[in-house]
Image (cartoon, rainbow, N blue to C red):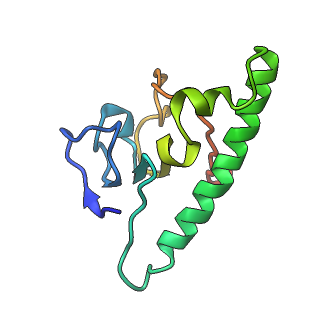
Amino acid sequence: SSSTSSSSTSSSSTFTGFHSMGGLSAYNACREGFVFSNGDLMHLPAPYDNFYSSCEDFRREGCEIAKIVYNELEKHLKLPKNYFEQQFGQLEATCQWHIKRYDPSSPSDVLLPMHTDPSLISVVLHDCPPSP
């Protein structure tokens, strides 16, 4: 459990902590937030002391969604059950989770440019303000 902030030289593949706008990579030019890697979470001081348990709940629910996706991929590809976890490790210990906030004053219409991701799967839940 760490509570570090990032610099642009931090390794984003193993980082756990908070990054500001533009931190870790150019893909974060319009967003800031928390990243949790390889089973790590982080504590925040009061009045945010329930942050850790909320993130545990978020990770648990996210892993349930990812397991459903894995199971469906295994069926479709005719792979043995639990193939992905056997190959890559237990989801809870090997996944990376992001909680990001976009800067509404960003001059760009593209808040997250097209990019490749080293993950086997990416589950993205976007929450954004309603259109005007």
Q: Nearer the viewer, residue 95 or 131?
A: 95
Q: Is residue 5 visible?
A: yes
Is residue 114 shown left or right of residue 13? right
Where residue 117 sits in the image (x, y, percent)? Answer: 47, 25
State how many labels appear.
Answer: 0
Q: Which residue shows up at 32% across the image and 38% down it?
A: 12
Q: Residue at x 74, y 22 (%)?
A: 80
Q: In terms of depth relative to the viewer, which is nearer, 77 or 112? A: 77
Q: Is residue 81 above or below residue 91?
A: above
Please report the residue visible at 44 percent of the width from the left and 80 percent of the height from the top: 49
Q: Position of residue 62 (x, y in %)?
A: 64, 49
Q: Horizontal placement of 87 versus 73: left or right?
A: left
| Image coordinates for residue 90, horizontal then vertical, percent | 56, 42
| Residue 132 visible here | no
* Quadrant location of the N terminus in the rendered image: bottom left
Furthest toward the top, the residue is 77
What x and y, as percent, mark residue 75? 81, 22
As drawn, is 132 to the left or to the right of 117? Answer: right
Please say if 21 is above or below 5. Answer: above
**Where 4 falls versus 11 (above or below)?**
below
The furthest residue to the bottom: 47
